Amino acid sequence: MDTSDPSAAARYPPATTLADFRHNLDAVQSRIQAACQRADRDPAGVRLLPVSKTIDEARIRIVHAAGCTFLGENKVQEAHAKWQAMADLSDLRWSVIGHLQTNKAKLVASFASEFQALDSLRLARTLDRRLQEEGRSLDVFVQVNSSGEASKYGLAPEDVAAFVRELPAFSALRVRGLMTLAALSPDAERVRACFVLLRELRDRLRQDAPDGIGMDELSMGMSGDFEMAIEEGATVVRVGQAIFGARALPDSHYWPADLGA
Ligand SMILES: *Cc1c(COP(=O)(O)O)cnc(C)c1O
């Protein structure tokens, strides 16, 4: 059964050639610049993280040729397999942006350059131990559940301050800031409220962040809402479909389905 969203398919035609990717990347960068201009922000302060989940190796090699050297993947096994398959692309780095079970921390520690979904001390401890064993360190973002939806991963906003105070114990984790998925809602103001919550939380945490804990970054915004996220302070936007085209898999494959729905 094809459960993909037909409106997404119309909005995001598939990119397959180098010209397609250049076109889509230019279009997304122009939208980033326009959003920065509206918000009186420097575009250099917003990093575009292309999200290549479900995209096969051949197309990833093309997007790499179009200039993308840092890619986001939701699932660690998928990311690891791609890292292995494309080890010949020596400048290609991977960010794992999806929920991670503690028993897969070793895999992330072995190859990832960034992990954006830190949400428990158990995971922090295990990741740190595995990284120490590998002699590596990792940029991490603390994932916050900004929508209040029970189906979303991440820490409750009120638990983040105490969590962050524990993180200096894990010296292989370089904490950079916060990450969130906004409410999946047609109501723009509900979506915006998630971004505002994350920014205000970051601003409060930054005032008394422990030594060595970075609280500058805000990873928020995807294909459907990255401009609004930039207006509210995003420093990293995670964009898949607007670059690669609509995905065949529904988002519920990557995010737990709404419990009550
Ligand atoms: C897939 C994904 C994105 C990108 O979503 P698009 O709709 O493809 O832009 C962003 N963040 C996370 C955590 C994702 O899994």
Image (cartoon, grey):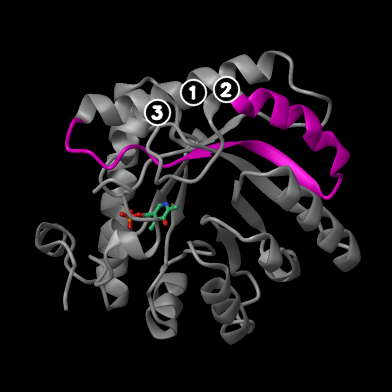
Could you say where residue 21 lies in the image, as x and y percent from the top left?
31, 67
Q: Image point 54% across, 26% down: which residue?
A: 157
Residue 168 visible here: yes
Of badges 3 and 2, the one in the foreground is 2
Could you say where residue 245 lies in the image, as x and y percent from the top left?
24, 66
Which amino acid lies under the numbered mark 2 shown in the image of this protein? Glu
Which amino acid lies under the numbered mark 1 shown in the image of this protein? Arg
Seen in the picture, residue 15 relative to 39 is either above or below; the reply is below
Q: Viewed as shown, does residue 113 lie left or right of 34?
A: right
Start-end of magenta stretch: 159-187
The residue that label 3 is drawn on is 195
How would you rate the neighbour count of disc 3 (Cα within 10 Å): few for under 14, some for 14-19, many for 20 or more?
many
Say which label, 3 or 2, has the lower sequence index. 2
The residue that label 1 is drawn on is 199
Q: In which quarter of the image is the N terminus?
A: bottom left
Rounded to the nearest whole Å, what is the CA distance between mark 3 and mark 1?
Answer: 6 Å
The residue that label 2 is drawn on is 158
Could you say where residue 204 lies in the image, as x and y percent from the top left?
61, 15
Ligand 1 - quadrant of the structure image: bottom left
How would you rate the neighbour count of disc 2 (Cα within 10 Å): few for under 14, some for 14-19, many for 20 or more?
few
* SS for callout 1: helix
